[in-house]
Image (cartoon, rainbow, N blue to C red):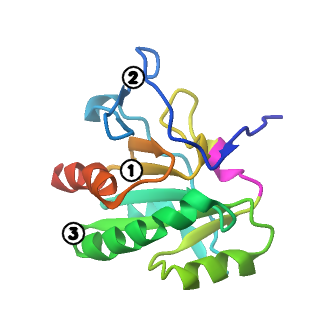
Amino acid sequence: MASLTLSACGDGASGGSAQTRFVQGKNGVDTVKPDERQPAPDLSGETTTGKKLDVADYKGKVVIINVWGSWCGPCIAEAPNFAKVANDTKDKGVQFIGINTRDSEKSQANQFEEQHQVPYPSLFDPTGRLMLRFPKGSLNPQSIPSTIAIDKHGRIAARSIGPLAEDDLRKMVDPLIAEK
């Protein structure tokens, strides 16, 4: 049985190597060249509002996955940045999706989403099982918050561990919008 070790509210420290085939960016965003990207895992389930959601349904769009918890201070701090960039890029072929984790009740997540005006759906993942689906050696979520960018072809393109400022989030999203 696999176990999940995520540090709560990480500081953003991570690194790359020849084995992992990704490059750590100066802004805390790790990226993978298009020809070395791995397919995103099956990320599907029920949302915090009880609807069914499958990330694969958004193939053809850039998908930004944000792993968060209502109890996480850095998640609270970055929420306005994600809401703003999600609203600014939705007409440019970008879909934001949250993965709410370690909240035992959907009501906790719903209250967070309402309070911070989160304009996109979040999968409800109280035990962290969705994060275990990321392939070994890929850019996977390693702390809360983590952000994963999936390109238009459904491949893992970038990751940030820790909270993202608006400018850094845009630096993660904009190159993927420009890709063919």
Extreme top residue here?
Answer: 18
- Is 72 covered by the magenta stretch? no
Answer with mark 3 or mark 2, whichever residue precedes in sequence.
2
Three-letter residue code for mark 1: Ile
Residue at the spot of label 1 = 150
Query: Residue 119: x, y in percent?
Result: 44, 80
- Disc sitting over residue 172 in the figure: none
Which contiguous range is marked in magenta?
A: 127-132
Quadrant in the picture for residue 113: bottom right
Three-letter residue code for mark 3: Lys
Q: Is residue 174 left or right of residue 168?
A: left
Above or below residue 86? Residue 65 is: above
Quadrant in the picture for residue 86: bottom left
The answer to whether one can see residue 122 in this image is yes
Q: Secondary structure at mark 2?
A: loop
Q: Is residue 167 left or right of residue 100?
A: left
Whether the residues at callouts 1 and 2 have beta carbons within 8 Å, the answer is no
Residue at the spot of label 2 = 21
Q: How many marks?
A: 3
Answer with mark 1 or mark 2, whichever residue precedes in sequence.
2
